[in-house]
């Protein structure tokens, strides 16, 4: 199961997005944000690297206790070691960990993350995402979710879903704004958000990756 979503909002404010539509190819995904009274920052979405462990852990430690609770479905002061290992080991094919990087004044900072699992034979995908506290209410979460949808559809995925706490009103509102349906989760405290993706590619390229791996589906 992909960990639950972190509270985020989808209020557009001075945001321009330029997305590469290649299948699960986030390397050139960029957007520029000009919040009031802030210096312009460039955000880049890229796959996680093995060297990103410390940066990713620092990012999670910087989230508020409530945000970490929402993200991990329970109290946690940081990303558990086993989850960090899974995140760094994502293969970039049927499992993917993405980092949203801010570049400003020569510095790079992780300001968001997403994890995606593709279940090729079912043509389904599961995802989770989070945005740093100071980058909310800028449309960043909405843009990130839109790009996840686009890349999943380009990979032949017809249904995208995730589970979040029913108290996570921000994520539920964001999902609804992107056309997700909200229903009961697999536990009473959870809600499942689900969306049928338009224009899913018919050839399902990740099926080949599953065959190479012996047909096993990957999960986090």
Image (tube, helix red, strand yellow):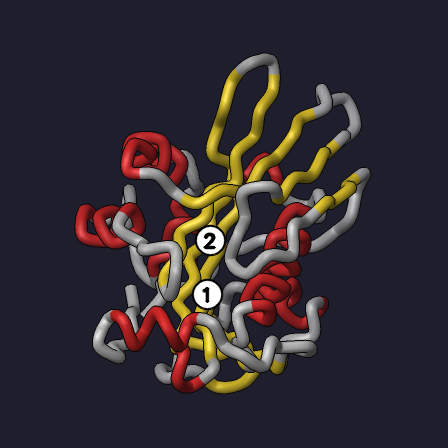
Q: Is residue 180 above or below residue 108?
A: below
Q: Which residue is mark 2?
A: 114
Residues packed near mark 1 inside 10 Å, few (<14), some (14 to 19) or many (20 plus)? many
Q: Nearer the viewer, residue 201 or 138?
A: 201
Residue at 38% of width from left, 55% of height from top? 92
Q: Position of residue 18 (x, y in %)?
A: 72, 45
Q: Which mark is residue 127?
A: 1
Residue at 65% of width from left, 50% of height from top? 20
**Is residue 206 in sight in this rendering?**
yes
Q: Nearer the viewer, residue 11 or 197?
A: 197
Q: Is residue 82 left or right of residue 136?
A: left
Asked which quadrant contains residue 53, the reply is top left
Looking at the image, tell me whether mark 2 or mark 1 is earlier in sequence order: 2
Q: Nearer the viewer, residue 91 or 130?
A: 91
Q: Is residue 112 above or below residue 109?
A: below
Q: Nearer the viewer, residue 145 or 201?
A: 201
Q: Secondary structure at mark 2?
A: strand
Residue at 34% of width from left, 58% of height from top? 72
Q: Position of residue 74 (x, y in %)?
A: 31, 59
Q: Residue furthest left?
A: 82
Question: What is the tally of numbered marks visible in this picture?
Answer: 2
Check contact, mark 2 vs mark 1: CB within 8 A: yes
Q: Position of residue 40 (x, y in %)?
A: 72, 23
**Is residue 162 in sight in this rendering?**
no
Image quadrant holding the C terminus, namely bottom left
């Amino acid at each position: 199961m992909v960990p639950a979503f972190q509270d985020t909002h989808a209020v557009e404010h001075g945001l321009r997005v330029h997305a590469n539509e290649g299948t699960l190819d986030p390397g050139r995904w960029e957007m520029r944000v000009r919040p009031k009274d802030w210096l312009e920052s460039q955000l880049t979405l890229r796959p996680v690297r093995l060297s990103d462990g410390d940066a990713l852990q620092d990012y999670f430690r910087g989230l508020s206790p409530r945000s970490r609770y929402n993200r991990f479905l329970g109290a946690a002061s940081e990303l558990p070691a086993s989850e960090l290992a899974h995140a760094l080991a994502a293969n970039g094919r049927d499992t993917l960990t993405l980092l949203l990087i801010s570049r400003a004044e020569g510095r790079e900072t992780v300001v968001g993350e997403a994890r995606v699992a593709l279940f090729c034979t079912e043509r389904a995908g599961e995802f989770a995402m989070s945005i740093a506290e100071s980058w909310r209410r800028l449309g960043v979460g909405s843009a990130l979710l839109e790009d996840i949808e686009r890349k999943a559809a380009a990979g032949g995925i017809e249904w995208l879903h995730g589970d979040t706490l029913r108290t996570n009103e921000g994520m539920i509102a964001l999902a609804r704004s992107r056309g997700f349906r909200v229903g009961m989760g697999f536990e009473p405290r959870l809600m499942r958000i689900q969306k049928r993706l338009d224009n899913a590619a018919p050839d399902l390229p990740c099926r080949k990756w599953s065959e190479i791996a012996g047909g096993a589906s990957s999960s986090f």
